[in-house]
Amino acid sequence: MEPVLLSPFLPELPHEMAAQQVEPSASALDFINWLQQGLAHRSLKYNEAGALVHFTAEGMALVSPLIFKTYFAERHGSVSNAESDAQALQVQREVIKAGWHLMGPGKTNILKYQVLGRAGVPVGKLSAGVLTRPDRWVVPVPPSNPVLRLL
């Protein structure tokens, strides 16, 4: 038997990754605009209990799916819950397709954070899509929320 030639796995080069980037959809851009305006006008709270946005060492954590449901409800008003949930999920997919987020273990799009209470005792969990390089949208970037720890 003759040996088999194996092709080595090589990481993608930066210019190859840039060629694969997708132009963000209109709905992804509208979501980012809504997010920016909400943060700027403080209608969207961040880094506090109950907030939909938290800044972490990894980036800007968007509490999912609640932030997308809130966006859809504010932009499109009242529709049936099933339709609203489906549309909010579609917006989340569009934001993910834009490639702005951090991939988690197993190529998951949603990361889990532990919420720490007094003395660093875990008191809850939070699921979030994390947008990397938040300085693309928010300047200055607020400090990381000290009560969140990536699981």
Image (cartoon, rainbow, N blue to C red):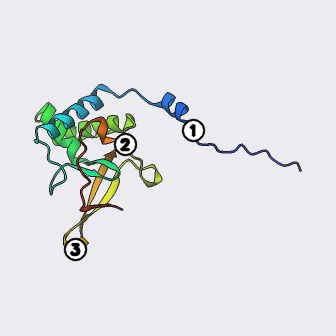
Query: Residue 70, relative to residue 122: is it above or below?
Result: above
Query: Residue 82, relative to residue 56: is it above or below?
Result: above
Image mark for residue 124: none
Q: Position of residue 79 (x, y in %)?
A: 14, 35
Query: Sequence-wise, which precedes: disc 1 or disc 3?
Result: 1
Residue 79 showing in the rendered view: no
**Dot 2: few (<14), some (14–19), or many (≥20) neighbours within 10 Å?**
many
Distance from the alpha carbon under mark 2 to that under mark 3: 31 Å
Quick one: 20 or 78, which is closer to the camera?
20
On-image quarter of the C terminus: bottom left
Residue 28 lies in quadrant: top left
Q: Amino acid at mark 2?
A: His
Query: Sequence-wise, which precedes: disc 1 or disc 2?
Result: 1
Residue 27 showing in the rendered view: yes
Q: Secondary structure at mark 1?
A: loop
Q: Amino acid at mark 1?
A: Glu
Image mark for residue 119: 3
| Residue at which label 2 appears | 101
Whether tag 2 and tag 3 are in contact, CB under 8 A, the answer is no
Q: Nearer the viewer, mark 1 or mark 3?
A: 3
Considering every residue shown, the one lying at the far right of the view is: 1
| Residue at which label 1 appears | 12
Q: Secondary structure at mark 2?
A: loop
Distance from the alpha carbon under mark 1 to that under mark 3: 43 Å
Q: Position of residue 67 (x, y in %)?
A: 21, 44
Q: Is residue 22 left or right of residue 62?
A: right
